[in-house]
Amino acid sequence: MIHARFLSALVFLLSAVAAEANWYFPPPPPPEEFGNLLIDRTSTKNKVKPVTFSHWSHRRKYTCQVCHSELDFAFKVNVSQITEAENQAGKYCGACHDGKIAFGHDKANCGKCHNGDRGYGKEKFPELASLPHSRSGNRIDWVRALEEKAISPARFLKVKPSPGIAYEKTLMLEAEWDRVPPAIFPHKSHTAWLECANCHPEIFNIQKKTTKHFEMKMNLAGEFCGVCHMTVAFPMSDCKRCHPAMMGWQ
Amino acid sequence: MKKWFVIALLIPVFASFAHAQTGTKKRRPLPYEYGGVVIGNSSANAGFSPVQFDHWLHRAKYTCRLCHVDIGFAMKANATRIKAADNMKGYYCGTCHNGKMVHGDRKIFEACATKYTREDLKRCSRCHSKGENVKQDYDFAAFTERFPKERFGNGVDWEKAEERGLIKPADYIEGVSIKRPALAVQKDFTIGAKVETMPEIIFSHKKHTVWNGCELCHPEIFAGIKKGMTKYTMVEIFEGKYCGACHMSVAFPTTDCQRCHSKPVR
């Protein structure tokens, strides 16, 4: 009997934790650090400082798919097997950082990446001040910036993809909770940056209603929308950008 | 009784961890890994590592149908149930790997043996190499260096490589294949997409028959030889059925969506 009570208490506690996970948003970093990463798969082990990487400085010049499809960078930090040798051979960072397109992998430049400073390069952030504003993330509306041609990021580096699929359907995703208005998902603003296979079928299955466990809790745990929307794309704390009819929230 | 109720309550909590198959991104295989197959039905029983088979080397030299139709390899790893004894009788790998057949300027090494010396073991490990540190005769990067590039899969546009004469895959082995008269191939046709505004697929029999003939796909993979008879969806393709029999594992992967969905939407 005591055992059963203990278990019920545990269930109660777990459901409380689960409920908490539906609206816990980590404190936002300053705009110039949003989307910045420290990559440290082997750096510290090899006694060099972790690599700083800023999404905002890269995405103004390249669409997501250049790095995340063509160069095959994973969507999670420290997963891609980036090594100095691979970079020197023109893979990963080395595809551009070769001394021609961007600064190369030579001794003089080590500290430009291997500096362990997440805020590195922030003095360049004001260069983006003229881009359309938003109220979260980098405080830049990247989608509008692209639509209005304030930036023109490249879609490929070496191998030109066949013309992309212009799939522009906007989905209305009904929320499972009462009083939570549906989320609007525009394919168009995503395909401007990404290609279909960046999300399908691994992150989102393509058969209707079979994407299981697609709920806020999972998004906030870094799955589904949360693969990008929290780390790089506008954060989910900006509720109304997806749930436009949300009342009483920001 | 109450205990079971509590356990029943807990099940969905744990199930939510167990069912997280979607929502995350998997690692894409590297170009030299793509099309790699690990075959190990009975290797371990014989005290060997499983066989690591790489499509990229074989497909540069032989057409798909030579192995998958004439020799009879299944289209799924470990479904053929290859045995050393069969290889030695000249079936499966042993059709070519018999120490006698010549390709180009080299003899094709013999597969499998009942008796072998310590020296022979090196030959075993040319195939039984999964997890072993074996230096192979062919290096992927050097072998594919001059081939036209593509984005996914092996990073090689095999179709263009053949068009340009950089590879000349053989389609005939004496005693195994038959001389087939070339069939007139119908023109490229479109396959409608099920989702509105999704571009239609342009399917080219011509491109497929170069390496596959008819028999590789019909009637087993695509039963219907009349357009529209075989019904399938992307979900089944992603499960490795229909187009997915090749285009998930060996031929350019389905991640290259627009290569098939290529007809402009009107």
Image (cartoon, coloured by chain):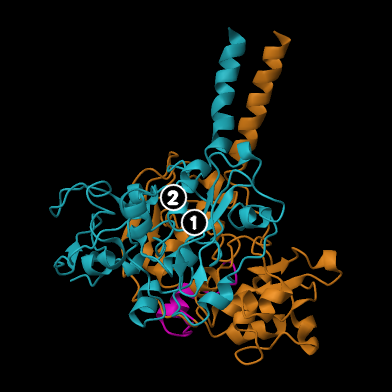
Chain colours: A orange, B cyan
Q: Give the camera-side residue of B48 and A136.
A: B48
Q: Residue at label 1? A: B98
Q: Residue at label 2? A: B90
Mark 2 in CB contact with mark 1 (< 8 angstroms): yes
Q: Looking at the image, which residue is at 66% across and 54% down? A: B120
Q: Is residue B129 visible?
A: no
Q: Can you tell which quarter of the image residue B177 is in?
A: bottom left
Q: Which residues are magenta?
A: A136-156
* Separation of residues labelled 2 and 1 (CA atoms): 7 Å
Q: Where's residue B160, x and y in %?
A: 36, 78
Rendered image: mark on residue B204: none
Q: Is residue A137 magenta?
A: yes
Q: Give the camera-side residue of B155 and A10.
A: B155
Q: Main secondary structure of the magenta part?
A: loop
Which amino acid, by three-letter code, is at mark 1? Answer: Asn
Secondary structure beneath dot 1 equals loop
In the rendered view, would you say B18 is above or below A125?
Answer: above
Q: Can you tell which quarter of the image residue A53 is in?
A: bottom right
In the rendered view, would you say A221 is above or below B17?
Answer: below
Q: Give the camera-side residue of B255 and B245.
A: B245
Secondary structure beneath dot 2 equals loop
B33 vs A46, left or right, is left
Q: Tag 1: Cα neighbours inside 10 Å, few (<14), some, or many (≥20)?
A: many
Chain of the residue under label 2: B
Q: Where's residue A196, x and y in %?
A: 40, 64
Total marks placed: 2
Q: Where's residue B155, x and y in %?
A: 48, 72
Quadrant location of the N terminus of chain A? top right
Chain of the residue under label 1: B
Q: Is residue A72 visible?
A: yes
Q: Earlier in the sequence, mark 2 or mark 1?
A: 2
